[in-house]
Amino acid sequence: MLPLTELPTGRRARLSLLAGERSFRRRLMELGLLPGTELCLVRRADLGGVLEVEVRRSRVTLRAAEAGALMVSPV
């Protein structure tokens, strides 16, 4: 397992663990980021530390600090 921030761009992974505050975890779950869900790191923005993730045919952008709370297992 590794944090989402360490996943190489273009790689697929399975979400293993959501860490952080309860409201943060709930919001991510509402967006479709549930443990066991497969996702793909689409791209990273150099400025601002933003990551774009594809999950369930939708794209979600996360701050790097938020993405560090997501633990994934590469597929």
Image (cartoon, rainbow, N blue to C red):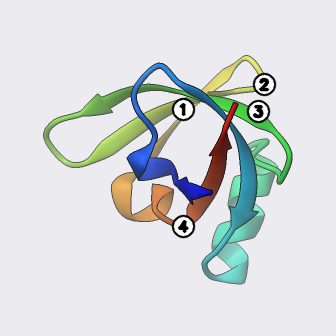
Q: Amino acid at mark 3?
A: Glu
The answer to whether marks 2 and 4 mark residues whose Cβ atoms lie closer than 8 Å is: no
The answer to whether marks 2 and 3 mark residues whose Cβ atoms lie closer than 8 Å is: no
Which of the marked residues, 4 or 1, is nearer the chain's N terminus? 1
Which of the marked residues, 2 or 4, is nearer the chain's N terminus? 2
The answer to whether marks 4 and 3 mark residues whose Cβ atoms lie closer than 8 Å is: no
Q: Amino acid at mark 4?
A: Ala
Distance from label 1 to label 3 (Cα)?
10 Å
The N terminus lies in quadrant = bottom right
User: Can you give x and y, in whole percent of width and height, for residue 58 in the image?
Assistant: 68, 22
The answer to whether marks 1 and 3 mark residues whose Cβ atoms lie closer than 8 Å is: no
Of the pair 16 and 48, the residue shown nearer to us: 16
Distance from label 2 to label 1 (Cα)?
10 Å
Q: Is residue 48 left or right of residue 65?
A: left
Which of the marked residues, 2 or 3, is nearer the chain's N terminus? 3
Distance from label 2 to label 4 (Cα)?
20 Å
Q: Quadrant of residue 29?
A: bottom right
Which of the marked residues, 1 or 3, is nearer the chain's N terminus? 3
Q: Using the image, tell me which numbered label, if any, was put on residue 56.
A: 2
User: Can you give x and y, in whole percent of width and height, for residue 49 in the image?
Assistant: 25, 48
Q: Amino acid at mark 1?
A: Val
Label 2, secondary structure: give it.
Answer: loop
Q: Using the image, tell me which numbered label, if any, was put on residue 38.
A: 3
Query: Badge 4 is on which residue?
Result: 69
Distance from label 4 to label 1 (Cα)?
14 Å
Which of labels 2 and 3 is toward the front? 3
Query: Badge 1 is on which residue?
Result: 53
Q: Quadrant of residue 51?
A: top left
Label 1, secondary structure: give it.
Answer: strand
Up/down of 50 relative to 45, above or below: below
Q: Label 3 crowding class (10 Å Cα cut-off): few <14, some 14-19, many 20+?
A: some
